[in-house]
Amino acid sequence: MTTESQRKPWSSDWRQATPTPRPGLRLSAAERKSLLFGWDFVIINGALAAAVVLWNDFPLDGFVLSAHLKWFVTLTCVWFVVATVLDIYNLARAASTSTILSSAGSAALISAVVYLLIPWLTPPILRRSYGFGFVALMTGGILCWRIFYARMLVHPFFRQYGLIVGSSTSALDLARAIQRAGKDGDANPFRGTGYEIVGRVADVEDAEATWEFPRLGNMRKLVRLARQFGVEEIILAHGDEKDLSLEAREILLDCREVGLRISSLATVYERLTGRLPVTYAAYDLQMLLSPLDSPSVRLYTASKRAIDIVLSLIGLLGLSLILPLVALANALWSPGPLFYRQQRIGKGGRPFPVIKLRSMIPDAERCTGAVWCEEGDPRITRVGHLLRKSRLDETPQLFNVLRGEMSIVGPRPERPSFVGQLSHELPLYRARHAVKPGITGWAQVHLEYGDSIEDSREKLEYDLYYVRHASLYLDLLTLLHTVRVVVGLKGQ
């Protein structure tokens, strides 16, 4: 840090910046999710404690209740699974009162009923009124809290504010996406994060970009403007760190000194959307570097493989039960082979044959060659529509998982002809090949089937996010969201 005598003339006005910060309690996206889960945890376990005391003749004694910790742990686990499957920690859904009954209310009701059906790990039902009382307390408590959140905690008083530095043309789309993340309109898929961009600071206007964010001033006024508008985060909209002059770096150091957070536009975008922007990631050396060879990484790799084997064996057992029904349906409405093989690109760019249940007419690509499947594709059979919607057509790939060619969770493997095209069109597309492809993936649970380069770009952003943040927790989230996709028949 520079001393007072060393401070450059262009940053000499920062200590005189006196505007009053905008009042408010800032809640980041991570804090909002923690707040939602924290109060959910208190309410559901409080409802259980109240129910066993009021209707199950249980003594009101904290020590006695704590001795039955398994009751509360089981309820919390059931709630987490059901709540994640129903996606109620999606900030967009949490901010909309119109989805409270269909999401949070349903999650509470289903969790309470499932919990009451679990033996040994739950309180014995001594009175019938206990079950009804527990369901009513838990569902009513969750509904009241979630309605309060949707009505009150999305207020501007609780929003976070950012200020963009720079005017790079390539940054405009990311800035727009971040701004949409803070809006609460029903059409906005990223609403509810409580993040808003108040404007931008730039010394030189970019004549090619039409910025809808007002230019508030130049770099010399950055600290003053941040305080005036109650900004907590300075967002750098530069494609390359070389774009930052020495003067700009000194002013950013001033921002750090007064407690402002400095982030890149790509980092903010990633944090709010769960996607890694393709254009900016192309300049990120982290995407080119291998992960550290640490014990935690090796433990994750070994655990993931063990889980893959166990889940594959269980899944193949279930597949053996439904195969006769699928074979019968195919024989009646779409005679032909039950399975088919198709070349895909796996980890390290190596091709391998993927196994699927046939969902199209035999020799569907004999005349057209390799083409993307389209909405209402006439090549898909009547049985194939159901197989694709439920994703049952992908289940034979469990054999690929057992052979080590695939994993349960990972980026979907693509066909060689498409890989060449997409690698040419999209920067860092081959970064997907750093991990094993999966039967389901972070992109698949967020987006529907894509049939264009632009759709592939959006999916790639989710895949790159998974490659960078791969963990058992992210795998678990993906699996739980996959249940929602399968049950809701939202497959490709």
Image (cartoon, rainbow, N blue to C red):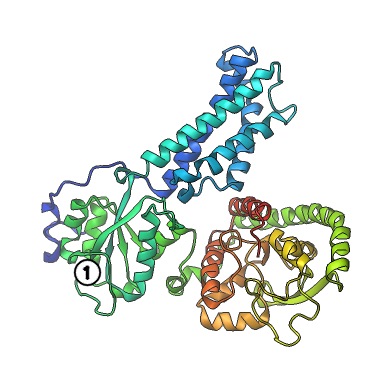
Task: Give x and y (percent) for residue 262.
Answer: 32, 58
Task: Give x and y (percent) for residue 356.
Answer: 78, 68
Residue 1 at least partly seen:
no
Q: Quadrant of residue 421?
A: bottom right
Residue 243 at least partly seen:
yes
- Which residue reaches farthest bottom? 367
User: What residue appears at the point 54 percent right and 25 percent down from the top-left corner?
Assistant: 46
Quadrant in which the C terminus appears: bottom right
Task: Give x and y (percent) for residue 264.
Answer: 36, 63
- Within-10-Å neighbours for mark 1: few <14, some 14–19, many 20+: some
Please name whichever residue, 302 or 270, is drawn nearer the observer in this view of the structure: 270
Please name whichever residue, 306 or 182, is drawn nearer the observer in this view of the structure: 182
- Vertical side of 241 occupied by 47: above or below: above
Quadrant in which the N terminus appears: bottom left
Q: Quadrant of residue 346?
A: bottom right
Determine which residue is flagged by label 1: 202
481 to the left or right of 236: right
User: What residue appears at the point 42 percent right and 41 percent down from the top-left corner?
Assistant: 150
- Vertical side of 355 occupied by 108: above or below: above
Under mark 1, the amino acid is Ala
User: What residue appears at the point 76 percent right and 61 percent down from the top-left corner?
Assistant: 395
- Vertical side of 481 occupied by 435: above or below: below
Q: Quadrant of residue 384?
A: bottom right
Task: Give x and y (percent) for residue 40.
Answer: 51, 35
User: What residue appears at the point 76 percent right and 86 percent down from the top-left corner?
Assistant: 366
